Image: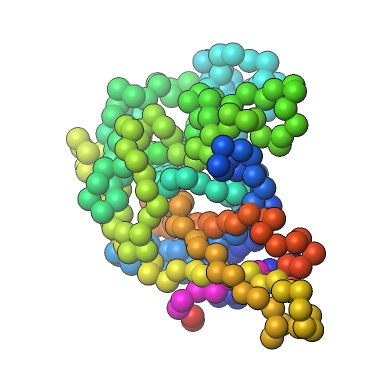
Amino acid sequence: METRIPDITGVDGLFLPGFIKAGGSIRQVASIIVKRSYDIDGSSLVPTDHGKALTLTDRLRFFRENGDEVPPEDARDEDDYLTLALAESDLAPFKPHADLVVKGAYGPGEECEALVDGVRWLHRDHDLFDNPDNLPADVTLDMFGWAPKSLAPRLDAFGTFSEAADTPLPNDFDNHFYNGHSRRYDRGVTMNYFAPDSHIEIRRDIRGADTRLTFNLATATPGASYFYHCGHGRDQASRWCKVPVPLNLDTLIVHPDSDRCQLIWRGHWELEAQPVADYRLLNIQFDETE
């Protein structure tokens, strides 16, 4: 199936087969992931090609208590290291809730918060942070970073494989495993998908300088549809059947130090909805063009 992504500033995307838990069972889905990068200009967002590429793999670093770095190939044998998730792959087939990540922009002991439409989604107080004094100077601390997939409580959502089960995911898999924000900072708040015009406020060092970054999300939103050969008439584009695929704005990654952010929309449908051989085209469009 051909995938058409609009050739406009800041946009990347792809088609991704994957698996989710639905209706009490593990189901194969076809997912659409659309990413767009923006410069934060005052309270507005301006599309930019910087940072637009989809992140395809996780990036982790591991440290012992004395600050020594542990090679990734050895980290699985350690039980006393700090795991820092520097980046997370964008290739999740589905997210049941939103992820808000704030990269960098943090100093030890600071109180910080992130608000969406006036509601506090994430909060970090100085007493929640492990002392980083022994970490190397090149380590940049994130205000609200990614949660490593290998650690609880996120790992708990993955479930447990059974030797008798012949499934790509455990039968007790929970889709919340695909959400990557730090659970330790969300204080149990339900982070629903972002609205196209959500107002974002990031506050750093509330007790001190109280630096604030505020902006509104872009109103330009992508739409997606897949086309398939309906099984009658000639196999040509004018006769293909069209099925719209709803997209949710489920991820916002903010870089306050560089005044930049990335938005990610995601949608899916059951791959077996049509015979695989009948799929012809996946088309992505934005409601505003440049």
Position of residue 279 in the picture relative to residue 124 (left or right): right
Position of residue 55 in the picture relative to residue 199 (left or right): right
Q: Is residue 205 visible?
A: yes
Q: Is residue 273 magenta?
A: no
Q: Which residue is drawn at the image coordinates 43% and 34% (left, top)?
A: 182
Count the labels in the image.
0
Q: Residue furthest front?
A: 232
Residue 159 point in image, percent of width and height? 59, 27
Q: Which residue is drawn at the image coordinates 31% and 42% (left, top)?
A: 121
Q: Is residue 139 visible?
A: no
Q: Quadrant of residue 281?
A: bottom right
Given residues 169 and 286, the one toward you in this image is 169
User: Which residues, given as a range, are shown in magenta?
Assistant: 282-288
Position of residue 118 in the picture relative to residue 182 (left or right): left
Given residues 52 and 70, the one toward you in this image is 52
Q: Quadrant of residue 166?
A: top right
Q: Which residue is drawn at the image coordinates 66% and 34% (left, top)?
A: 169
Q: Is residue 284 magenta?
A: yes
Magenta part mainly helix, strand or loop?
Answer: strand
Q: Which residue is drawn at the image coordinates 60% and 57% (left, top)?
A: 269
Residue 136 point in image, percent of width and height? 52, 28
Residue 255 point in image, percent of width and height? 43, 51
The N terminus - image quarter: bottom right
Given residues 96 and 5, the one toward you in this image is 96
Scheme of colours in the image: rainbow
Residue 88 point in image, percent of width and height? 57, 42
Instruction: Say if 256 sits above or below 280 in the image.
Output: above
Q: Quadrant of residue 11?
A: bottom right
Instruction: Say if 220 sits above or below 92 in the image.
Output: below
Position of residue 279 in the picture relative to residue 283 (left or right): right
